[in-house]
Every structure is written in C-alpha cells, then in structure tokens.
Amino acid sequence: MEQAVEANKRPIVFSLDLEDHLGLYEAEGRFARNMEKILDFLEDSGIRGTIFTVGRIAQSHPGLVRKVVERGHELGCHSWQHTPLDREERSAFTAETRLAKELLEQVSGAAVSGFRAPIFSLVPSSLWTLDVLGELGFTYSSSIMPMASPLYGFPGAPATPFRWPGGLVEFPCPLARLGRFRIPYLGGIYLRYSPEFLTRQCIRRTTPAAMLWTYIHPYDFDSAEPFTRMPGTSLPTSILLWLNRRNTFEKIKFLFRNRPAIRFQDAMSGVAGYRELPVFDPERHQLVH
C-alpha cells in the first residue's frame, strides 16, 4: 500500500510536441487553434510543462510561441520541420536545427536547452546528430524509445536517465511492463486509449529511477477534426490516430490529480548530480561510470 501511495505522488513532466500533423504551418491551421485551447486548459489546471516546438512555428506563428513562454512553460526544440533524424543529412540538419533554436529563442526571449527528435527517431543510425546537438548548445534530450518499435525504437538503451558520451543528458520515454509487453503508456494513442486503472497500474510498474513524462500533440485533443489521412501513415494507423480524442483533457486532469506537474528544466535542476549520471556506450549497449 505504501509503495502504491508513493507511486501516485511521483512528479510527471507534462510535455507536448507542438507541430502540425498535416504540415500546414503557413496557414491558420487547426493546430494553432487547438494549442490556444490547450494553453487555457493548462492555465486553469495549474500545469506548467515543456513544449517541444517545431522551428517553423516560430516563423509562422510567433505570437503562439511567445504565449507558451508567457504562460510559464519551458520551450524546447522539436527540429525545424519534423523530419525524422534518419532521413537527415548532416549539413542540412545542422543549419536547420541552428535556425530553429535561434528563432525560438529570439521570438520567445527564453533559452532553449532541450531537444526532442521527431517520432523518437534518435536511433543507432542517427547517433551522429548528438554531436550536432552538443555543438548547438543543447543540454538534454528526450528523444529515444528504449524498446523495439514498429516506427523508431532503441532496444538495449537504458530506461532511466543517462548521459551520452558527449555529455548530453537523455530522458528516455517511460515504459511499463505488462506481461511480456513494454508499453509507452504516457502519451499519444496509448494514453488516449488506456483506461485510468491501467494507466495507474503502469505508473506503479515503472521503475522508480525513470523520469515520468507525457508526450502529447495538439491533434490528440481535437475531437472535432474531420478524418484526414496523416502523411506517411497507413490507413489503419490514421484511423487509430483520429479516433478516441474526446476524453484527452480528462485524461490529463486524471494524470495530474494529486501529482506534481513539472518541466524538464525543473527535472534538470532537481537532479543535482546529473553530471554524475552513468554514460551509455551505444556501441556496446552498456552503461559505464
């Protein structure tokens, strides 16, 4: 009983990926209207989080980016235009990520120190991007799914915070083991489709050393959107992503009922010895100290 009570008190980082799932950044798309509603909801709920934002949004919707910071949220970078890292070329990625970081900082007036790869695409074949992120001044990442996945996963990577060899701190996506399955239950369709009792059970089953954080998107809240097939997805996947959105606000309320909501910058400052975190050697798939 005591362990369950403690699990229910664990802080959770509220994080959201501010992107347009249809890639229509120049238009007054649904993502911007949905984000305004989400910011009002977070304000009313007393939730402050980290908003990983696609760089193009600082160009097309600077007022929205400013509002994110004005409401007390941390601003992170979610690449320039949501291209998976394994499809990037080094010189273009460097230039575009530098531009994204600079624009986000100029528009918001706030430092940007965190990076999240699109679709958790920091995988063995894209590890070269870590050097670029370090050169550009990022101090942490939340970019890996430490399991095998139909899209992007990093099997063998730690499930608890660690440092990459260059010093960048990594906060892996939190997983819970249910039988022989590992589930990234705190975001996307997993959070939307899971009943509350299952989410509660998953929190209990997540190792205490892991950092709990959500990963959610503006479209996850948009129950009124007409069905549109998302670029790059199969028809069944698009249908799955479209359905079951109407209770997302309630799911977030449930998650942060009696649980502290924090930002990644709070987690970084709270981990006084983050420089002492073990280093993960991706070639040997081992933690070294």
Image (spheres, grey):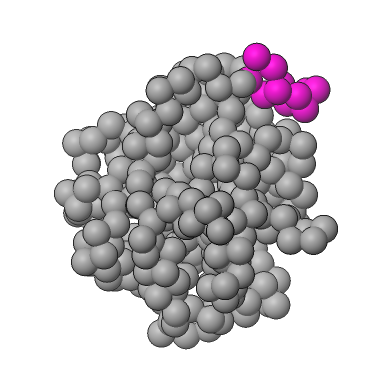
Q: Residue furthest top?
A: 289
Residue 207: where, in percent of width, then height? 62, 45
Q: Quadrant of residue 74?
A: top left
Residue 4 vs residue 100, the one in the foreground:
4
Residue 112: in sight, yes or no?
yes
Which residue is drawn at the image coordinates 35% and 46% (left, top)? 262
Horizontal side of 285 relative to 110 (left or right) equals: right
Q: Residue furthest front?
A: 1
Which residue is drawn at the image coordinates 76% and 41% (left, top)? 155
Residue 116 vs residue 200, the one in the foreground:
200
Q: Is residue 287 magenta?
A: yes
Residue 54: where, in percent of width, then height? 41, 48
Instruction: For the N terminus, give its image quadrant.
Output: bottom right
Residue 271 vs residue 127, the one in the foreground:
271
Where does the magenta region start and end? 279-289
Which residue is drawn at the image coordinates 52% and 17% (left, top)? 276
Q: Is residue 141 magenta?
A: no
**Taking 165 as reference, is 53 above or below it?**
below
**Taking 114 as reference, is 173 above or below it?**
below
**Taking 178 as reference, is 254 above or below it?**
below
**Taking 194 as reference, is 275 above or below it?**
above
Instruction: For the C terminus, give its image quadrant.
Output: top right
Residue 176: where, in percent of width, then height? 66, 54
Horizontal side of 152 relative to 94 (left or right) equals: right
Which residue is drawn at the image coordinates 43% and 64% (left, top)? 255
